[in-house]
Image (cartoon, rainbow, N blue to C red):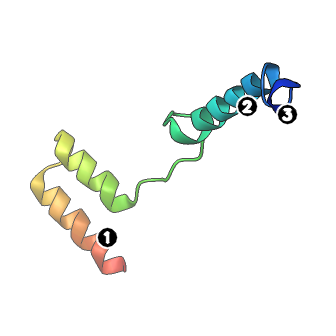
Amino acid sequence: MHLYDGHFGGMHLIWWIIWVILLAWIFFIPADIPYQKTLKDSPLDILKKRYAKGEISKEDYEESKRILNSDN
């Protein structure tokens, strides 16, 4: 009975669809948001990346890794 008096049809339905799409876009679509806080790499992660890039030798890597692990 109330389906044809404007409560669930016309622009009301369109606004619900817009809100659902907007919420889905905000919460479910992954995106890099500018100025978003990111997790910082640990010193061991940085050391692994430098070794993988070839910036440091295996001996330097092993020594630095031993030093970092002994601090814990």
Image position, residue 5 (x, y; %) = 88, 25
Q: Which residue is mark 2?
A: 16
Q: Compute the Cα span from label 1 to label 2.
A: 55 Å
Taking the image as shown, residue 58 lies to the left or right of residue 32, namely: left
Q: Is residue 61 above or below residue 20?
A: below
Looking at the rendering, in which quadrant would you find the C terminus?
A: bottom left
| Residue visible at 59% across and 47% down in the picture | 37
Image position, residue 55 (x, y; %) = 21, 42
Q: Which residue is mark 3?
A: 2
| Residue visible at 36% across and 78% down in the picture | 71
Q: Is residue 55 above or below residue 43?
A: above
The answer, for residue 5, to whether it is visible in the render is: yes
Q: How many marks?
A: 3
Q: Amino acid at mark 2?
A: Trp
The answer, for residue 35, to whether it is visible in the render is: no
Q: Are marks 1 and 2 in contact (CB under 8 Å)?
A: no
Q: Which residue is mark 1?
A: 68
Helix, strand or loop status at disc 3: helix
Image position, residue 50 (x, y; %) = 25, 46
Residue sitting at the far top:
10
Q: Amino acid at mark 1?
A: Leu
Tell me where residue 35 sits by quadrant: top right
Q: Nearer the viewer, mark 1 or mark 2?
A: 2
The 10 Å Cα crowd at callout 2, few under 14, some 14 to 19, many 20 or more, is few
